Image: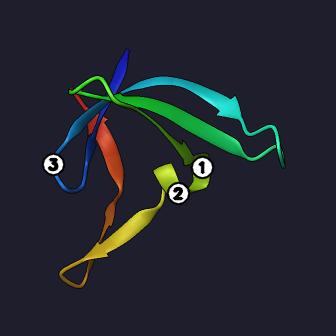
Amino acid sequence: MVRYRHYKGGVYELVCEAVLEADHTPVMVYRGQDGAVWVRPKAAFFENVVVDGVAVPRFSPHP
């Protein structure tokens, strides 16, 4: 599995890419270290967020 680090520090495993049935939005399905499964629109998963005035990736690849 590919792992990503959230800008707040958590590490998540990418489970798969899927499509939201209601409007066909591409989404990313990912699992936290606690086993919780999350879904986020693909565009939001890969977008930048501003932290202390600096744009950083919301998720970045984690070895």
Label of residue 52 in the image:
none
Task: Please say if the residues under marks 1 and 2 sit with CB atoms less than 8 Å apart.
Answer: yes
The residue pinned by badge 2 equals 44
The three-letter code of the residue at mark 3 reads Gly
* Relative vertical location of residue 6 with respect to residue 31 in this rendering, above or below: below
- Residue 59: x, y in percent? 34, 48
Q: Residue furthest top?
A: 1
Indicate the secondary structure of the residue bearing disc 3: loop
Task: Please say if the residues under marks 3 and 2 sit with CB atoms less than 8 Å apart.
Answer: no
Indicate the secondary structure of the residue bearing disc 2: helix
Side of 43 where 55 appears, left or right: left
The residue pinned by badge 1 equals 41
Task: Find residue 58 and report its image quarter.
Answer: bottom left
- Residue 8: x, y in percent? 19, 56
Indicate the secondary structure of the residue bearing disc 1: strand
N-terminal label among 3 and 2? 3
Task: Please say if the residues under marks 1 and 3 sit with CB atoms less than 8 Å apart.
Answer: no
Label of residue 9 in the image:
3
The three-letter code of the residue at mark 2 reads Ala
- Residue 9: x, y in percent? 15, 48
Side of 17 where 2 appears, left or right: left
